[in-house]
């Protein structure tokens, strides 16, 4: 049979007629095919979808910011890094930064940046204490600690490590002592007495002075401080206090060596997840740390424990420290060699007022 060939023009005309018929009979058209959204509704639906996709993209970008910048939704920095550490930017092994400019050097972190560095990264992991503390050369027995719960003190400083300790044989101090004392309700302030300033005043400390490689020595002793703290069940996030007895901070060479040692110790302790604290006389070591802070120098202590005796507790009234420095990161040792008795147990102690982090115990 011979097939008819329909021209394209006629085909298009027929399609147009069919479309016109469908428009004139909407009921029939609706019954003949599934209902589709109106163009306006389709656009609105696509708009909602676009907004959903945009929100998804915003969430993705937020997650990328958290991953790449290390910050949570409050903007707190949780990266395991040290923003003060600038050795990779050309400093020498002592962390010195243009010492020809003066003893204190010059850094890139000013006063406004203090307190917003690594030491605040672990804010949720830090135990904070406000109240009175005592420290004594030999760690007291558990019986003494139990009896002294009736005292006005609720925290205790322990000389747990370091070659410069006056009381090296700590027969009571071990992991069980730390755990049981903490379970009694005591807070713990771990003190490391390591190498001392070359110009240290105390005769009994001159045999443990910092050598001619202060940065290397500071790093080594910082590692020791962390290892010995861990052996006692003291957890990361805890402050470890470097005890630097009074020295002649006016001696520029000695001050430079001491600061190199302290900064290297701080870097090592901080890099291992602990808070580097610093104990010293208000008129020597503490004054030097404050001058370094004001100059913008990095790798400084996270917590300051200053000794100024024969005064009332004055945590934020120390002349060697600006009031805005080390807020809630201070301890004032305001009296020394005081004899006190509680529950029938007598101790010779130093008295302290605390507004600072304390140890986290396993």
Image (cartoon, grey):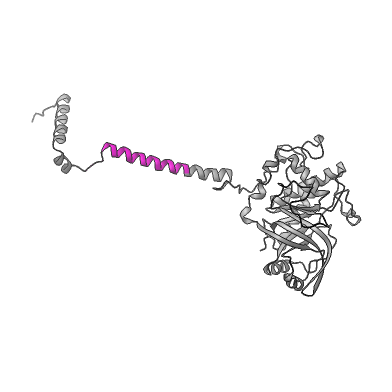
Q: Is residue 44 left or right of residue 79?
A: left
Residue 270, horizontal then vertical, whole percent: 70, 50
- Report the number of numbered marks: 0
Magenta: predominant secondary structure element? helix
Residue 215, horizontal then vertical, whole percent: 79, 46
Residue 300, horizontal then vertical, whole percent: 74, 46
Task: Pick whichever, 236 or 324, lies toward us.
Answer: 324
The residue sitting at the left extreme is 1
- For residue 235, above or below residue 28: below
- For residue 97, above or below residue 313: above
Any magenta on residue 50? Answer: yes
Task: Pick whichever, 350 or 188, lies toward us.
Answer: 350
Residue 329, horizontal then vertical, whole percent: 70, 52
Q: Which residue is depicted at the point 87% across and 54% down?
A: 208
Any magenta on residue 317? Answer: no
Q: Which residue is depicted at the point 16% across and 43% down?
A: 31
Residue 45 sits in quarter: top left
- For residue 145, above or below residue 309: below
Q: Indicate the quadrant containing the N terminus: top left, top right, bottom left or bottom right.
A: top left
Residue 159 sits in quarter: bottom right
Question: Which portion, as a residue range, is magenta?
Answer: 35-58
Task: Pick whichever, 160 or 356, lies toward us.
Answer: 356
């Amino acid at each position: 049979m011979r097939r008819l060939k329909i021209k394209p023009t006629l085909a298009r005309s027929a399609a147009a007629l069919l479309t016109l018929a469908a428009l004139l009979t909407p009921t029939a058209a609706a019954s003949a095919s599934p209902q589709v959204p109106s163009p306006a509704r389709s656009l609105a639906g696509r708009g909602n979808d676009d907004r959903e996709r945009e929100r998804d993209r915003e969430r993705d970008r937020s997650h990328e910011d958290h991953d790449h910048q290390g910050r949570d939704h409050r903007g707190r920095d949780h990266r395991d890094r040290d923003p003060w550490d600038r050795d990779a930017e050309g400093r020498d092994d002592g962390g010195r930064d243009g010492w020809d400019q003066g003893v204190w050097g010059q850094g890139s972190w000013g006063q406004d940046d203090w307190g917003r560095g690594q030491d605040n990264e672990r804010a949720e992991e830090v135990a904070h204490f406000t109240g009175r503390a005592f420290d004594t050369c030999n760690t007291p027995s558990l019986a003494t600690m139990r009896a002294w719960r009736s005292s006005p003190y609720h925290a205790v400083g322990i000389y747990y490590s370091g070659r410069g300790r006056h009381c090296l044989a700590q027969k009571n101090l071990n992991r069980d002592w730390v755990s049981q004392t903490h379970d009694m309700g005591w807070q713990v302030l771990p003190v490391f007495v390591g190498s001392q300033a070359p110009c240290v005043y105390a005769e009994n400390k001159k045999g443990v002075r910092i050598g001619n490689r202060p940065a290397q020595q500071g790093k080594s002793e910082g590692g020791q401080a962390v290892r010995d703290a861990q052996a006692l069940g003291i957890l990361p996030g805890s402050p470890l206090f470097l005890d630097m007895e009074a020295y002649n901070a006016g001696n520029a060479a000695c001050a430079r060596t001491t600061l190199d040692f302290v900064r290297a110790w701080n870097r090592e302790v901080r890099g291992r997840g602990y808070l580097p604290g610093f104990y010293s006389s208000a008129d020597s070591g503490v004054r030097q740390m404050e001058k370094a802070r004001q100059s913008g120098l990095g790798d400084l202590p996270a917590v300051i424990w200053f000794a100024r005796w024969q005064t009332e507790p004055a945590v934020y009234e120390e002349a060697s420290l600006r009031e805005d420095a080390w807020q809630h990161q201070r301890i004032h040792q305001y009296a020394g060699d005081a004899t006190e008795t509680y529950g029938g147990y007598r101790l010779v102690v130093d008295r302290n007022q605390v507004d600072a982090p304390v140890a986290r115990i396993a």
